[in-house]
Amino acid sequence: MSGRGPARPTVPDEDLLVRAGGRDKDAFEAFYDRFERRAFSLAYRIVGDRSRAEDVVQEAFFSIWKNAGRYDPGRGSAGGWALGIVRNRAIDHLRSRSSRAPDLDHDDDSALESRESALRTEEQALRREEGRHVRSRLASLPENQSKVIGLAFYGGFSQTEISDLLGIPLGTVKGRMRLGMEKLRHELSTLERETA
């Protein structure tokens, strides 16, 4: 397959991943090209270091290549499956770097906050506390709204990328995000009034 043919961009992600599962290197390369930037963004947000994020992405895509044959298009989008592997690798990387492996079953944020930091300031502590409030309110939203908002703000994905990732129309993503953000604003303004 040529790297410049007009058919390449129109091949669905799911088809590329299925073909990669059959050891089609061109399909895997095309899949990598589509998701490498998003994978790096996600890994970087979790591990907080450029070099370590690159390692995570490399390990994740090696795992994707090895396990592409296990991908089942009926169980979700190819992008969601692949980025789930990236996320898991990034969290594993945090665990291996930590002297105390955090229990991620209950609170992934505890792992993110346990990273060593030379600049632990009061401002950062306040931001983390505000972040906890936002995440707790986000968790109270309907799942379809919290998912798109979480992908946008914690995963760094654009609305178009979220649409592709979840396999839903862009208008649906925008609508869910708008409704969720309105509810979040209301919840947070209520919280501010209560704590003032």
Image: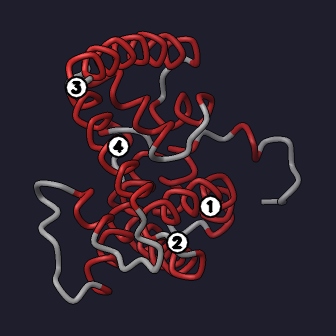
Q: Do the numbered discs 1 and 3 sit on residues whose CB atoms are within 8 Å?
A: no
| Residue 99 relative to residue 19: left or right | left
Report the Cα–Cα distance between label 2 and label 3.
42 Å
Residue wearing tag 2: 57
Query: 181 or 72, which lies in front?
Result: 181
Q: Name the residue rendered at 27%, 23% in the picture.
A: 196
| Residue 98 relative to residue 101: left or right | right
Residue wearing tag 3: 195
Report the Cα–Cα distance between label 3 and label 4.
16 Å
**Going from the N terminus, do you reach mark 4 or mark 1 first?**
1
Question: Quick one: label 3, few (<14), some, or many (20+) residues within 10 Å?
Answer: few
Residue wearing tag 4: 131
**Going from the N terminus, do you reach mark 2 or mark 4 first?**
2
Report the Cα–Cα distance between label 1 and label 3.
43 Å
**Going from the N terminus, do you reach mark 3 or mark 4 first?**
4
**Going from the N terminus, do you reach mark 2 or mark 3 first?**
2
Residue wearing tag 1: 36
Q: Do the numbered discs 1 and 2 sit on residues whose CB atoms are within 8 Å?
A: yes
Q: In which quadrant of the rendered view does residue 104 lie?
A: bottom left
Q: Name the residue rendered at 88%, 54% in the picture.
A: 4
| Residue 4 relative to residue 92: left or right | right
Query: 84 or 152, which lies in front?
Result: 152
Q: Name the residue rendered at 57%, 76% in the picture.
A: 54
Question: Quick one: label 1, few (<14), some, or many (20+) residues within 10 Å?
Answer: some
Label 1 sits on what residue type?
Answer: Glu
Q: Which numbered disc covers residue 21?
A: none
Report the Cα–Cα distance between label 1 and label 2.
7 Å
Disc 3 element: helix
Residue 29 higher or lower than 18, as above or below: below
Residue 70 point in image, percent of width and height:
32, 60
Q: Which tag is nearer the camera, tag 1 or tag 3?
A: 3
